Amino acid sequence: MSRMSDTWILAAQCPSRLGTVDVVTRFLKEQQCYITELNSFDDRLGGRFFIRAEFRPELDGFHEESFQADFAARAGEFDMQFELTAPGKRTGTVILVSKADHCLNDLLYRYRTGQLPLDIKAVISNHPDLEPLATWHGLPYHYLPISPETKLQQEAQVREIIADTDAELVVLARYMQVLSPSMCELLAGRAINIHHSLLPGFKGAKPYHQAYEKGVKLVGATAHYINNDLDEGPIIAQGVEPVDHTHYPEDLVAKGRDIECLTLARAISYHLERRVFFYAGRTVVFSN
């Protein structure tokens, strides 16, 4: 899924104005860098410009620090914010789970086979059930039970693990707990959640069984960054599949799990490859 093992990534955004593409492409040419992929978008309603370039230096002796310093001087004329990502970067990650194992199992497979360039620091759960799966992959597993009375104390332990591991990304792989406002603020822009997408929006226990009773014709999943609005954060990726009267509740559950796994992995890949930009409470995503 990841293709960034041998290319650098330059991702930037700025106010819309003449010359925004040129300032990036001309600089890369002057630095003898060959562009292997280029995406850009100008939001005419918001007056905001977004650009992402994958490139490969053609000359030996590429210096990241001098590149950033020189481009910062050029980008400053456009009030351009940018990020440079090195080839093969593996992002420190903590995964939060509860009892469901399908998303965790899928992520660990993609991690083990190198499809997702993650450096998984720990798996945290409010249940002990998935410890054997994490242990088999040689990963630390932190069982942190939670109750209404211990919620803040448990979140403090989660914060400590994230801080101690210096994790850049947190993945809620079917973590069935509502995070506090302070936790959402701490993890803004670096925590990805996955949940089902059923119409109507069935809430509570057994949503797929509720969907079966209503005769739904579509099942899906949404991956998004968390915020203080439950399951309403900026969307990164969505998946959907048609179903019909031949699908019993267990069939809907199985299909839903597959879509959740694929959608979550896709969202994480977009995040790692710097394809996602925040602006005005939503996302711009250069999907590949």
Image (cartoon, rainbow, N blue to C red):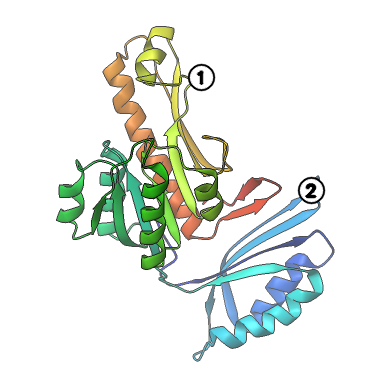
Considering only vertical position in the picture, is 75 above or below 239? Answer: below
The label number, if any, that marks residue 34 in the structure image? none
Instruction: Specify whether residue 189 is in view.
Output: no
Instruction: Specify whether residue 216 is in view.
Output: yes
Considering only vertical position in the picture, is 274 above or below 107? Answer: below
User: Which residue position holds label 1?
Assistant: 199
Determine whether the residue tagged by mark 2 lies in a helix, strand or loop. loop
Circles 2 and 1, Cβ within 8 Å, touching? The answer is no
Left/right of residue 76 with respect to residue 157 in the rendered view = right
Question: Which residue type carries mark 1?
Answer: Leu
Residue 47 in percent (x, y) is at 81, 52
Quadrant housing residue 209: top left
Which of the pair 193/244 is nearer the observer?
193
Considering only vertical position in the picture, is 287 above or below 86? Answer: above
For label 2, the crowd category at 10 Å Cα-Cα, with few meaning under 14, some 14 to 19 and many 20 or more, is: few
The label number, if any, that marks residue 46 in the structure image? 2
At horizontal 50% and vertical 20% (from top left) the residue drawn is 201
Mark-to-mark CA distance, 2 and 1: 30 Å
Which of the pair 234/41 is nearer the observer?
234
Question: Which residue type carries mark 2?
Answer: Gly
At horizontal 58% and vertical 79% (from top left) the residue drawn is 33
For label 1, the crowd category at 10 Å Cα-Cα, with few meaning under 14, some 14 to 19 and many 20 or more, is: few
Left/right of residue 165 with respect to residue 232 in the rendered view = left
At horizontal 23% and vertical 59% (from top left) the residue drawn is 140
Residue 214 in percent (x, y) is at 43, 8
Residue 243 in percent (x, y) is at 39, 18
Residue 134 in percent (x, y) is at 21, 52
At horizontal 64% and vertical 77% (from top left) the residue drawn is 28
